[in-house]
Image (cartoon, rainbow, N blue to C red):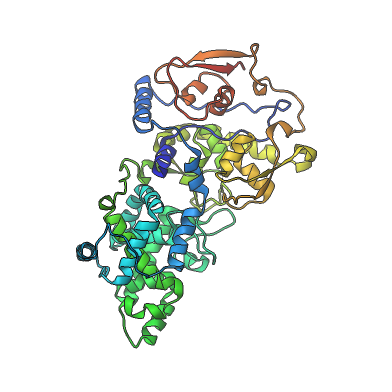
Amino acid sequence: MLFRFFTILLLFNVTVCLSQMKDSTSVVTKKLSLKPLGSLKDSLLIKKVETDLFAADLEEKWLEELYSNSLYDTIYSSIADISFEEVDYPELSTELLKSRLADLSAKTPFNVEYNPGLESVIKSYLKNRRNSFQKLIDLSAFYFPLFERELDIYDLPLEIKYLAIVESALKPRAKSRVGATGLWQFMYTTGKMYGLDVTSYVDERSDPIKSTEAAAKYLSKLYEIFGDWDLALAAYNSGPGNVTKAIRRSGGYQNYWNIRHNLPRETAGYLPAFLATMYIFEYAEEHGFKKPRPEVAFFETDTIRVKQMITLDQISEQTGVAMEELQFLNPSYKLDIIPYVKGENYTLRLPRRIVGDFVSNEDSIYAYAKAEFNKREKPMPQLFDADSKITYKVKSGDFLGLVARKYAVRVSDIKKWNGLRSNNLKIGQRLIIYPKNTQRTIASTASNSSKPITSTNAKTYTVRSGDSLWSISQKFSGVSVQNIRDWNGISGSKLKPGTKLKISKT
């Protein structure tokens, strides 16, 4: 199910955030118009692709999984508390497992040898963690092509891609209890050693490409030291010093299984978890897991070098790309702000279908961003009525994008009001919210375009074949995708020909 979410993320064209400091008594900054997406033929083709690939609507539980730490916590606990006790799982016989492990060992430089401990871990995962592994299999369709490309460049075993599952559960912003961050869980110092920049705005440990390249370099170095991939992985987890000590304390043994009892507790379960994960992925179909659709990969996106500071909120408003999608594609920007620093090469990653339009309209987009930054340089007391703020208690299934849409505010606003440095929320957490209708600016001129739709200031538009929310918004000056969604109670992106939509006159 989660894979459908990431599929929708890559091609889902909808704006989810409203402009800050706009209400029924404030001046609305006119949305800068972008050029049409192409010819009617192109529009129909895009519509056909969207219809063919994404018949299902976006569901909140997929977004909940994206911003939740539950999958990462599950994987982490499965390693830290790994058990080698015998597991009753008659669906997989010992003899069949031995045969499959032997076949797997023949294809990889890792020592995938049968032992009762590994059998217990594999059967425990199959019996108790099926849902988690199905989600990981779904996620892998997005990341594995990227991992394999980088591993191939550095001539490393492609099976190392499974290490990112053990390390981070494929969560780019995963952070361990000791501060290791990203898909490959780099500590601050190690990340710096391998070229990963960390600033107040940027954490390249969360950048999928840069962190994978750094992991490949680090693993290559560890293999040079130990000459064995099992030991290299153990050193990746606990450091080469701990592996060297374990070898010495074990009397000079250099097989992982012979030194495991002298390794730190977490590392002792690290390689078994990696090998069990490798086995389940390699034999996923035989164990009834659903194979993800191969059409979607990281390569269906592209990057643009930014020319001035800009926020993901502003990009979302100007391009119609969902805020959640932008956050997913640009996880290294900690505050959802892409800085511009002379000499640095900070880039924005977008779906390829959007890149051309962004480049064609970048002058107006940057002008809009600059105007927004200038407008925000006002003291908080002048912008909000402190008596009208509300306190929202986070419930199960909540994520920042959902709460932002509920109160028609920006994700970045909620983070700023509450001093949040990440997108993670905890059940029961209390958030301060200034709902859109309680925000006030110094300007007092009312804007007709922000008033509720009435019979006197609205017209009706009939949806035609090939229409999308984006193409309709471009037919009306000052109307955004989010406006149409709000005025008509639309939560998804699918439109049926013949549907009547209310459109505000501007």
- Residue placed most toward the observer, 104 or 232: 104
Q: Tell me where residue 456 sits by quadrant.
A: top right
Q: Which quadrant would the N terminus be assigned to in this image?
A: top left
| x, y percent for residue 472 | 49, 21
Q: Which quadrant would the C terminus be assigned to in this image?
A: top right
Q: Residue furthest top?
A: 456
In the displayed structure, would residue 120 be above or below residue 17? below
In this figure, what is the number of numbered marks?
0
In the displayed structure, would residue 326 be above or below residue 214? above
Q: Residue furthest bottom?
A: 251
Residue located at (75% from left, 24% from top): 445
| x, y percent for residue 143 | 37, 50
Residue 205 shows up from this direction = no
Does residue 481 appear left or right of residue 110 in this picture? right
Residue 121 shows up from this direction = yes
In the displayed structure, would residue 255 be above or below residue 444? below
Residue located at (56% from left, 40% from top): 401
- Residue placed most toward the observer, 471 or 438: 438
| x, y percent for residue 405 | 59, 35
